[in-house]
Amino acid sequence: MLVKSIIAGLAGTALLATVAVAQTPTDKGDKMSPAATSPAPAASTSATSPTEFKGNWRASKVAGLSVYNDKNESVGSINDLLMDKSGTIKAVVIGVGGFLGVGEHLVAVPLDRVKFVSEPIAYTGASNGTGGTAKTNTTTGAAPAAAAKPNPWYPDHAVFNASKDELKAMPEFKYSTD
């Protein structure tokens, strides 16, 4: 039994070693290496530098963003982004109401009607303990200090000018299987 385990271990090690040896070395500036004299493969010509994407947002981070109206009232969150076959985003699916996704009303709104904002919401006024949306420092009653620098890869929140009731009155969006 022990001999079989040792043989299996040696065979696995030999297989891994052959994979490591078969890898092509990267060019380290050696003018005589084939990698330095042969043209780059076509796939590497389409590579882009990270700075080319500066100012773009990650779609994975946009899904889940809170949605507020023009009065800074929370009205829902972004559940999905809908795009055409060329990859252009056409609509935003907003989830309204519900609890943990149960009873949530989904509405699809055109992308051009949703505004994305990088700066956090500026809360004004004090919380009166009746469920207001203003955030204050509980020890001093003062507004919180300025937020940290916005993340360049995704917005802080989205703005869609409608109340929760107006969104719930819109036709419900359902994912079609047709």
Image: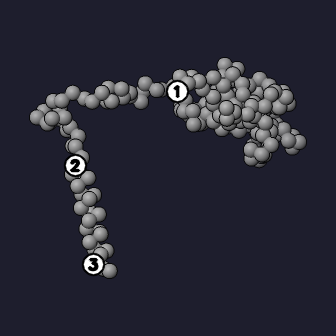
Instruction: Residue 175: give x, y in percent of width and height.
Output: 69, 34
Residue under the image location 14 percent in, 36 percent down: 33
Circle 2: residue type = Ala
Q: Indicate which disc, 3 or 1, sits on the residue closer to the N terminus.
A: 3
Q: Indicate which disc, 2 or 3, sits on the residue closer to the N terminus.
A: 3
Q: Which residue is mark 2?
A: 22
Q: Which residue is mark 3?
A: 3
Q: Label 1: state its secondary structure.
A: loop
Q: Nearer the viewer, residue 146 or 105?
A: 105
Q: Nearer the viewer, residue 101 or 30?
A: 101
Which callout, 1 or 2, points to the residue nearer the camera? 2
Circle 1: residue type = Asn
Circle 3: residue type = Val
Whole-number angstrom distance, CA of label 2 to CA of label 3: 29 Å
Which callout, 3 or 1, points to the residue nearer the camera? 3
Instruction: Residue 157: give x, y in percent of width and height.
Output: 67, 32
Residue 154 falls left or right of residue 172: left
Q: Indicate which disc, 1 or 2, sits on the residue closer to the N terminus.
A: 2
Which residue, as the protein is rendered here, is positioned at the far front? Answer: 178
Q: Which residue is mark 1?
A: 56
Coloration of the structure image = one colour
Work out which quarter of the rendered image holds the N terminus and state it: bottom left
Label 1: few (<14), some (14–19) or many (≥20) C-alpha neighbours in 10 Å: few
Instruction: Residue 151: give x, y in percent of width and height.
Output: 56, 34
Work out which quarter of the rendered image holds the C terminus and state it: top right
Q: Label 2: state its secondary structure.
A: helix
Which residue, as the protein is rendered here, is positioned at the far top? Answer: 112
Label 2: few (<14), some (14–19) or many (≥20) C-alpha neighbours in 10 Å: few
Residue 120 falls left or right of residue 36: right
